[in-house]
Amino acid sequence: MDIQQFRAFREVARQRSFSGAAKELFLSQPAVSRQVASLEAEIGLPLFVRMGNNISLTDPGRKLLVYVDDILLRLDQAASVIRDLKDLESGTVTVAADNYLGKYFLPRFAGEFHRRYPNLHLNLITHPQEKLASLLADGQADLAFFCGEPQDNLPLTLEPLYIEQLCFVAPGPLYADISGNIDRYAPFLFPPEMSSFGEDYKIVLPESISRTDSPIVIESLEGIRTALIGGFGCSILPRNLILWELEKGLLQAMSIGLECPVILTYPKDTRLAHPVLLFMVVIRKMLSV
């Protein structure tokens, strides 16, 4: 008895058809028939009752099927374990993210991932949010992260990781009425137009403040943060971007009631490689601390 005989026997039992089994196994019908006949000859008992186009298991066939299912399941599990071990020696994880998460969120996990799995390779790539789904579909990325509400009807698994809070940020003391005291912090440094968290923050600004009239334009969140640390201006920034500065008292922040969900996504009904699952575990563990 060999594995090919077992696979042919099990598939005929499932399909109740030699032609159906041949189609599923990508074999010819005579090849499947030979495998089953050979197995029956070795056992010395018939495994199927054939009555015209109807095929059913004999009692020995039903008893054998229980063991064959278990053998093939364990074989598949063993093959999966071997693949995972091989992946841990040379696997690669490619992660795509929108601009904010690619620059300021994902890099914080790279060091811990490398410490735990030094033989694995991690590629972090940044793309506009609207391109992330196509990167996953084309196999150019294993996982994708974005900040904001997901699009509907995409064949993706979506896993919310945490909620990013947007804050009004300035170097000095803050006043509860932001709009009425905006001149005290001037100028207002507008976040880049392509920021992942959109421009809903404008609801807290007076109508007199506009991007086109802004005397200073800094096209990066990091640049704005640096300007604020230097005592210049005010802005709207995600809280996680300035945690260290808040802890050290270099900046002051006040919530403006706007939140942005951070979403992990990957294709539905896809078996993720073991290194990819390990990267997801690292992120979840670090976020839970």
Image (cartoon, rainbow, N blue to C red):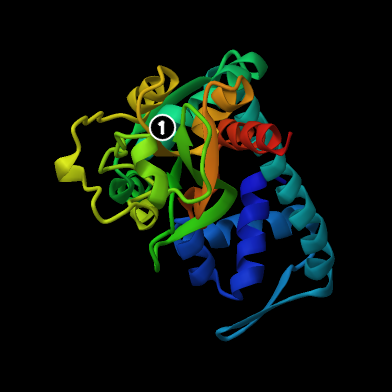
Number of marks in picture = 1
Residue at left offset 38%, top offset 34%: 185
**Residue type at the position of mark 1:** Gly
Nearer to us in this view, 195 or 60? 195
In x, y percent, where is residue 87?
57, 26
In x, y percent, where is residue 141?
40, 38
Instruction: Relative to 42, say whether 247 is above or below.
Output: above
Q: Can residue 96 be seen here?
A: no
Nearer to us in this view, 24 or 275? 275
In x, y percent, where is residue 279?
59, 32
Residue 35 appears in which quarter of the rendering?
Answer: bottom right
| 246 left or right, relative to 42 | left
Q: Can residue 72 be seen here?
A: yes
Q: Quadrant of the C terminus?
A: top right
In x, y percent, where is residue 95?
44, 34
Nearer to us in this view, 189 or 85? 189
Residue 215 appears in which quarter of the rendering?
Answer: top left
Nearer to us in this view, 148 or 124? 148
Instruction: Relative to 233, say whether 133 is above or below.
Output: below
Determine the secondary structure under disc 1: helix
Residue at left offset 33%, top offset 47%: 129
The residue beneath circle 1 is 102
| 148 left or right, relative to 252 | left
| 286 left or right, relative to 24 | right
| 64 left or right, relative to 202 | right
Instruction: Relative to 221, say whether 132 is above or below.
Output: below
User: Is the residue marked by circle 1 packed among few (<14), some (14-19), or many (20+) residues within 10 Å?
Assistant: some
